[in-house]
Every structure is written in C-alpha cells, then in structure tokens.
Amino acid sequence: MQRSDIPVYVQVRNQLWQWVQKQQLGSQERLPAERELAARFNTTRVTVRQALGQLEAEGVIFRSNRRGWYITPQRLIYDPSVDIGFYKTVIEQGLTPRTETLSKRLIETPNWLADISGMEKGAPIYHIVRRRSVDLRCVVVEHNYINPLGCPGLLDQDMDLSIWKLLREQYDLLPGQRNIEIFPQALTGVEAEALGVNSGSAGLYMQRLTLDKSGTFLEYDREYWIHDALKVAVQVNNN
Amino acid sequence: MQRSDIPVYVQVRNQLWQWVQKQQLGSQERLPAERELAARFNTTRVTVRQALGQLEAEGVIFRSNRRGWYITPQRLIYDPSVDIGFYKTVIEQGLTPRTETLSKRLIETPNWLADISGMEKGAPIYHIVRRRSVDLRCVVVEHNYINPLGCPGLLDQDMDLSIWKLLREQYDLLPGQRNIEIFPQALTGVEAEALGVNSGSAGLYMQRLTLDKSGTFLEYDREYWIHDALKVAVQVNNN
DNA sequence: AAGTGGTCTAGACCACACG
DNA sequence: GTGTGGTCTAGACCACTTT
C-alpha cells in the first residue's frame, strides 16, 4: 500500500474487489482468510477487516459464523403487498427456498398487539415463528400473528409453505387493506442468533397489518431480514 | 470491565446506553469524546468505537463528520405512495424541514432511464438533485427525472418545496401507477459526501417510477436515505 | 492551539468450525 | 489439532473542527 490521500482500507477494498471479480467468484463462494489477505496486501488484519466491512456494508460479501467471508447472492425481489408467498417468489427467481417453523402456538393477545389490531387483550391468537432461507442461506425470521376466528385448527397444518395460500384455499380468507412499515434496523438478540449473524448486523425490518375486506383483523406480521438479501418492490395505484 | 462470557464492547455499549438514558440526552445532543469514554470504561478507543458502532447500527446514535457522536432524532414516517411531499410530511410530525437544490438541468435521457421509463434515448428530460434535512440534519439526497412534455419551464420554478405540488397545481399533472423499489444499500461516493457521512455508511435506497393515468411516463425518482432517518409506511388495498 | 474522530500498526488470546 | 474469525491492547499519526 503506497499512494497518499486515499485510505489504505479503501485501497484494500478496491484491490480485493477487483481480484474477486477477476477470479469470477460466484454466489456463496469463499474469500481467502483474513490473515492471508493481510499478508497479500502488506497490512494488518484490522485494516483488512475494515475493508471487508466496507464490502459487507455494500452488500457484496457477507460473513457466516466464524467460517469466513462469502460472495453475496443476488437480492430476492419481494413484494409485500401481494400474497404470492415466499416459496413461490423464490422459485420464480430460479432460487431454492427453505422454511423452518421454529414455533407455532396459541397465545393470549398481548397489549401492544391488541392496540394495533383491534383484537381484545388476552384473546387467543396464533403465533407462528418461521426462519426462511434462499439457497441454504438464512435470510429472514418471520413472526405471524393470526386471528384464529376464521381459521380453526390452522396450527395442525404444515407451515413450511405459504400461510396465505392456506388461508385462501382452506379457509377462504382474503386480504383487504394492508398497512406496511419498512425501515432499516440492526439485527439483535434472538433474531440475530436465529439468522446466524452477529448482533448489530445490518437488517431490514418489515411489518404488515392485514385486514379483510370488511375491516376485520386477519394477520399481523413482523419480518427481520438480512440487509443484503432482498429488494422490496411494491406497485401502487393512486386514485 | 470484568465479567466473563459477554464481550467487553457489548458491556461498554450497555453501560454507555444506560448512562445516556440516565442523563436524559435528547435528540442531537453530543456524547462524550471517545478518549474520555475509553478512560471511563477502562478500555481502549478501539473497543469504545466498536460499542459506538453497535449503537450506530441500531440507529440510536449517529456521527457527524469529525465532530462527535450524537443522539439520533426520531425517525421520519414517510409514505412514498402518496404526494404529500417532504416539506409537509416533516412539518406534520413537528419537525423542521430544509431542502437545498444542488442542481437542476435539462439533460438527454440516458439509456438506462430510457429502458425503464419508455422515454426515447437522448430525449430531453429534467434532472433535479436535492438534499433534504430534518432539524438541520441531512437525511436524504434525491434525484428527480421528470418528463418535460407536460411541464415546460419547470426548472424556472422554486424547487425547494414539493415538486409534486408544482406538477399538480401549476401543470395539472397527476400520478397514476407507481412502481416503488426499496432496499438497504450503503451510502458511497457523491451521495455519502453530500450527506456528510463516511463512504460505506448504512443507507436505504428508494426509487419510484411514476406514470400518469394513461400510462405516460411522468417522473422517476432515486432517493438515498441515511439508514436511521426514516420509517417507510405504505398503505395498500388488495382487490 | 487544542481537541476530536479517522486511520493504522503489530502484536495477542479466545471460542469455535472443520478436517 | 489446526486454522478461522471475533475480540482486545496500547500505543501512534493525521486531518479536520472548534475554541
């Protein structure tokens, strides 16, 4: 590293990324070890990690546990305003989905949920937690809260596919109005752990409140995404 | 720092945040210097900065140039599907907006824009770049590309308020269909510089393609937001 | 001029993943 | 067991901001 002005870690970032592209490293392929990179660029691990952190922030590489740094797969294009479902969305983009149901229970509606959903406090409500992957990489942890009135016995069904497909085809439930909130938020605590990332990793939080056409609460949904895993695409018609 | 198991920087993060809350530091108030924190927590600046980085990722503090660390203001709630406009949105939430027009020019439609907008390649198109602040903190850089056919002389107007208000009231232009894309993306290059943040800082990218009711291209819009500055809220009706 | 954050070095130890 | 990333130390110099 010589040159002035431009910081060493930026130079390392540039040369490293140039090298990666020349090697034509593909999705989920591993980068050399940090110590090796430090030697190759004649600098220290701290500086190399700063460069790797840059590329991570840009979303082009990601880290996995203590195993190393990998090339980030293409973003999943995801439309939260429709009910295609995660499974079908992923398939249609030529990728491989996986869903693990971490828990499904009947709980009492907590106060915060009663306030936003119109459910009565303490009323029974389904709570389902699922972890979903694209090409074996965990990308999102999802909490679903579902009004059990229209879908008795829902928890006995297989949750590893689309819940909305179940609601539509088994229970004839259809969404009307949706309120969606999206914002960047660090992954911490149980979500970070479930996704196998460090606490504090960049993430995207998304929540949806769905009512049926008569305004009755159907479902509330919290999703914690890895920051580099998705592109939200919504189509809206103004009238 | 004693205790085992839990990393020092997490302990520092926790104690620091606890201290901040006890001090009741408010929006945009400054934290103590890094060296002072290092001394207070009996550790090094590197570890302190790791703790600060955690809080930054969580969106509760932010850094400004080389001036220090500050408490993050509340997020701006922002609905990209309607045309209330930035100015009014900010006002309504009891905050102070500011818009600076960085450039406004008539350019030739570049190929990438022709492809997504339906404009002819090379056809004249307005390009407006603005920087917007909430309570004197820069939060977003916005690129607008506007079809000049329906709004001749637009560039002579004052751009520091809402463009959509101009289009609506001066030119009778109304949006029909909107395609919105949102995803986390690091701020780099000119955008990072314009916002006064380090290249590689976490950000949120949002783009909107707006057609009128007859399907004619009206406007294309790219927004580069500071990651902790906004909460996107969209309301959708399924039919 | 003094203080600040931004960058960087050259080591070190640890827990964990993998062979 | 070996190698990996994760964490941590105790300094240093620089560019920039603020006083």
Image (cartoon, coloured by chain):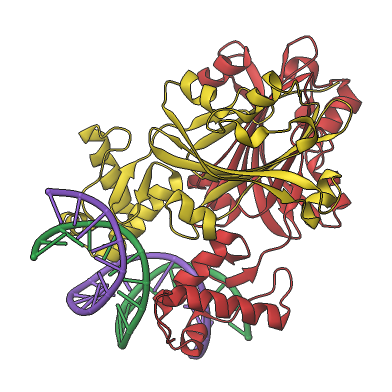
Chain colours: A yellow, B red, C purple, D green
- Picture quarter with the N terminus of chain B: bottom left
- A202 up-or-down from A96: above or below: below
Query: Residue B137: x, y in percent?
Result: 69, 59
Query: Residue C18: x, y in percent?
Result: 20, 49
User: Does residue A1 appear anywhere in the picture?
Assistant: no
Query: Residue B166: x, y in percent?
Result: 85, 30
> Which of the 4 quarters of the picture holds residue A141?
top right
In front here: A227 or B239? B239
Q: Residue at 76% x, 60% y: name it.
A: B135
Q: How many marks?
A: 0
In front here: B132 or B156? B132
- Picture quarter with the C terminus of chain B: top right
Query: Residue A111: x, y in percent?
Result: 80, 57
Q: Residue at 58% x, 81% y: name it.
A: B32
- B26 up-or-down from B213: above or below: below
Q: Residue at 41% x, 27% y: name it.
A: A96
User: Does residue A239 appear anywhere in the picture?
Assistant: yes
> Which of the 4 quarters of the picture holds residue A237?
top right
- B197 up-or-down from A117: above or below: below
In the picture, measured across the screen, residue B152 lies left or right of residue B194, that is right
